[in-house]
Image: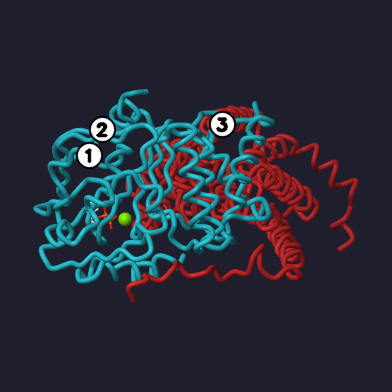
Amino acid sequence: MGEAAVEIEDAGLRFGDRTLWSGLDLDVAPGEFVAVLGPNGSGKTSLLRVLLGLQPLSSGSVRLAGEPPGRGNQKVGYVPQQRAIDESAALRGTDLVGLGLDGHRWGVGLRGMARRRRLVAGAVASVGAQSYARFPVGRLSGGEQQRLRVAQALVGEPEVLLCDEPLLSLDIAHQRAVTELIDTRRRTAGTAVLFVTHELNPILPYVDRVLYLVNGRFRIGTPDEVMNSHVLSELYSTRVEVFRVGGQIHVAGAHSALCEDLPHHADEQVP
Amino acid sequence: MEEFFDLELMFRLAGVVQNGLLAAAILGLVAGVLGPLIVLRRMAFAVHGTAELGFTGAAAALLLVGTGIEYGAIAGAVVAAALLGVLGGRSGERDSVIGVVLSFGLGVGVLLLWLYPGRASNKLGLFVGQIVSVDASTVVVFAVCGVLVLSVLALVYRPLLFASVDPAVAAARGVPVGALAPLFAVLVGITTALGVQVVGVLLVLALLVTPAAAASRVTSSPLLATVLSVIFAETAVLGGIMLSLVPGAPPSPFVTTISFLIYLVCRAVAYRRDRPRTGLGPPPGTLDPIASPVR
Ligand SMILES: Nc1ncnc2c1ncn2[C@@H]1O[C@H](COP(=O)(O)OP(=O)(O)O)[C@@H](O)[C@H]1O
Ligand SMILES: [Mg+2]
């Protein structure tokens, strides 16, 4: 420990002549909770893919759990943005969670079944999914699959947790439950969390820092440092007002900043 | 109708084709084990394409060597599987690549068969299976291929399952998703080629896909689905051969019919089981995410 769990150094990513971001420097300490915000297409998912070693950088370097990207992936928990499971797949919720534990290991995995079952049951219970964990995953609702996804990401006791819009299709109660679960995890086990989201408010009480990406520019800082009218106006290059109402942050003005999640949600919830 | 159920004759004939039955049992085991993964990976069409190229290979062996169709079929199917694994990496492209490759391969195979001067029954055997022609050396080929396929599968089973149902997270956890696809395709290719002798090239789907499709109707446990799929495949292939003996018909219509009936039964069971409980757990419509308060 002591060392950063995620180290991003002068990183840049370009597709053709389009620069998603460049000159990105960010160290995430063990146990730190970093929210990644930004409009659609600003490169949030791509950043996670870079950290996982699935997408090479155009410039700079990253390290994850002390290793080059792609090398330490067993120490990483991942909740993907596209997560629909085939409706007819012969796979139960418990199988999905179990794959998060040892699905990367070679062999059939018949040994250690008892321990595996215990760990999976614990992870399932921690997201409150006991009542449906034995049903076919593909037939569960988006929110139920989502909670199993979080259990799948946590069951392997990751050092780094990368979540891509994990609150999508969850109701408020479960948004809170999932966020608290992740928060507990990072407090007790020192897991570093990178949390991509459209909506900061549900996680605001837990967030240490915010990385806000817009059109190739970015800002990193505490929510107070980033989520203010001055900084966001600069990022969006247009007048943006930030209001704080009852401990929540509301952004008005940059159309894409505040409304983009609504149509976006609509098409992503359809399996 | 009576001689159809002449049990004594049936078992006497079974003794004659015991090599064929042995080979069929090996095929049923391997096909049954691979089946659930084929179904999970939506590879039914790929299996069909692979089988048709196995036919091309078998036809080439028949024409060029005059015998050894099992080696020809294996070569053809493995080349096809590797080709499909490499060319059809993206699932969007896969269907069309299979269509392109299999139609060409089938055309070549028909040409080769037309050129073959030998007996017509050898030709027909490629399509409908020819259990009588299985001798001890063929059984050895089946056994070696079976052990090979099952050993490799045992080694890669868990990551392969992970990559099949959940490729994004599997890749994120370090599973070589890209390399497993062609590897699995080759395993399927070898198994498909074995099917040439038993049910014929065109009907291997009845053993590689139907039993697994039936099993995944009645269970969603990957382990139980595999066990059931093996039982269904063995029932179909051994039962089908036994029933074909007395009338002296090719086994494939019997094998495919049993396979199909098992599938129908499993669908019926699943329908009955799922009907009383409408919806699983909480009502299907999930709550919308909270609307942005600014609106
Ligand atoms: N492999 C790729 N090749 C070309 N463009 C890509 C590739 N991956 C992502 N992009 C583009 O990069 C942009 C950012 O994508 P993404 O990281 O998914 O954004 P976000 O998650 O912030 O919505 C998108 O416009 C997408 O089309
Ligand atoms: Mg994204």
Q: Secondary structure at mark 3?
A: helix
Which residue is disc 3 drawn over? B145
In the rendered view, would you say A253 is above or below B207? below
> What x and y, as percent, mark residue A57?
19, 39
In this view of the protein, which residue sits in the foreground, B184 or B55? Answer: B184
Q: Quadrant of the N terminus of chain B?
A: bottom right
Front label number (2 vs 3): 2
Q: Are marks 2 and 3 on the same chain?
A: no
Q: CA distance from mark 1 to mark 3?
A: 39 Å
Front label number (2 vs 1): 2
Q: Secondary structure at mark 1?
A: loop
Which residue is disc 2 drawn over? A7
Q: Chain of mark 1?
A: A
Q: Quadrant of ligand 2?
A: bottom left
Determine the residue positioned at 22% across, 56% down: A42
Q: Quadrant of residue B170?
A: top left
Identify residue type, mark 1.
Pro
Q: Colour of chain A?
A: cyan
In this view of the protein, which residue sits in the foreground, B36 or A179? Answer: A179
Q: Are marks 1 and 3 on the same chain?
A: no
Identify residue type, mark 3.
Cys
Q: Are marks 2 and 1 on the same chain?
A: yes
Front label number (1 vs 3): 1
Q: Are marks 2 and 3 in contact (CB under 8 Å)?
A: no
Determine the residue positioned at 55% across, 61% down: A87
Identify residue type, mark 2.
Glu
> What x and y, as percent, mark residue B151?
57, 28
